[in-house]
Amino acid sequence: MEYNWKYFEKFSFGVEWNYRSIAMLLFLVMLPNLLGMMNMGTIYGFKIHFFQIAIFIAALVYGPMGGMLSGLAGSAYSAYAMSNPYIVAGNMILGFFAGLFARYGLNTVLAVVLAYMMQLPWLLVTDYYIMHLPVAFITSLVIALATSNMVWAVAAHYTAKPIARILK
């Protein structure tokens, strides 16, 4: 049985490993914890979150595995602060699929929209059925995350390219 290895390459980190690329990955893995401590004031009643930009940059530069690692480790503070461990898995889903869709050639904004669509069922099920959060809160969270995702997808698109060039 022959395998078509080009599909497995989509899951590789896709960088040459050296001190610079390792340091950047570690930075992008831990940065969402710091950014998760900050929320922009409310705009029309919705908080703008900052943590996604690091996850999206990791996904664009390091692929699905980089995005997943950034979502995993980078969500530790938020999960602890909100007593919601399901945040970690949700952000892993977001980072993994953003990286995967980007590796398949989709533009960053579309890759992030599709990744968010993959994350959304997890968020809804865990927040409503397991965490028993009110529907009004979940609705505002879904809108706030969608808005933040779009803002940070555009920012990550322009930020990831210079970072990838530096790592080569």
Image (tube, rainbow, N blue to C red):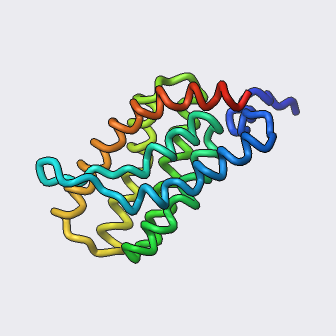
Q: Quadrant of the C terminus?
A: top right
Against 98, residue 157 (above or below) is above
The location of residue 35, given as percent across then percent down, is 43, 55
Residue that appears at 71% across and 39% down: 13
Q: Quadrant of the N terminus?
A: top right
Which picture quadrant has residue 146? top left
Q: Relative to the observer, which residue lies in front, 66 or 136?
A: 66
Against 131, residue 125 (above or below) is above
Q: Relative to the observer, which residue lies in front, 92 or 129?
A: 92
Q: How many numbered discs, if any?
A: 0
The location of residue 7, given as percent across then percent down, is 71, 30
Residue that appears at 47% across and 23% down: 107
Residue that appears at 47% across and 28% down: 157
The location of residue 133, given as percent across then percent down, is 26, 71
Q: Relative to the observer, which residue lies in front, 161 or 121?
A: 161
Which picture quadrant has residue 164? top right
Residue lying at the far right in this picture: please name it: 1
Residue that appears at 60% across and 31% down: 163
The location of residue 15, given as percent across then percent down, is 74, 34
